[in-house]
Amino acid sequence: MANLNYGTPEYYKEMFMDFLADVDSEYPKYEQALVQGFILAIDDWRDYHAKQVVAYEGVKQRVRKALAM
C-alpha cells in the first residue's frame, strides 16, 4: 500500500483486497467470519455514535441552561 493517499479509491481497493484474500472456497468459515466481522464493526460504530448523540444532547442542555435559553 505504498504511496497511496488515504481516502482515494486506490487506497480502499488495497484495503478490500486484503480482506478478499481471505475468501477461500476450501474454507467457507473464513468468508462467514469476514461477513460477521463486518456486521459487528457496523454495530460497534452505530453504538458508539448513538452514545455520542446522547452526550451532545447533554452538552446542549447544559449550555442552554447556562445561557438561560
Image: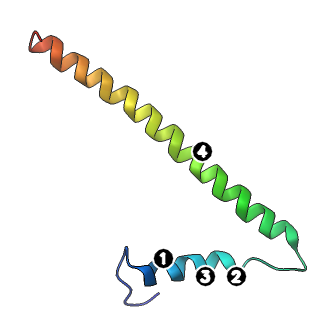
Q: What residue is pinned by disc 2?
A: 21
The amino acid pointed to by label 1 is Tyr
* Residue that label 3 marks: 17
**Residue, disc 1:** 12
**Pointer 2 local density, CA inside 10 Å: few below 14, some 14–19, many at least 20:** few
Q: Residue at x 65, y 50 (%)?
A: 40
Q: Is residue 18 left or right of residue 10?
A: right
Per the rendering, the mark at residue 43 is: 4
Query: Does the CB distance between marks 2 and 3 fall below 8 Å?
Result: yes
Give SS at disc 3. helix
Q: Secondary structure at mark 4?
A: helix
Spot occupied by residue 8 in the image (x, y as percentages of width and height): 38, 78
Q: Secondary structure under badge 1?
A: helix
Q: Are marks 2 and 4 in contact (CB under 8 Å)?
A: no
Closer to the chain start, of discs 2 and 1, is: 1
59, above or below 12, in the image:
above
Measured Cα–Cα span from mark 3 to mark 1: 8 Å
Q: Amino acid at mark 4?
A: Asp
User: How many numbered markers are drawn?
Assistant: 4
Q: Position of residue 57 (x, y in %)?
A: 31, 24
- The C terminus, quarter of image: top left
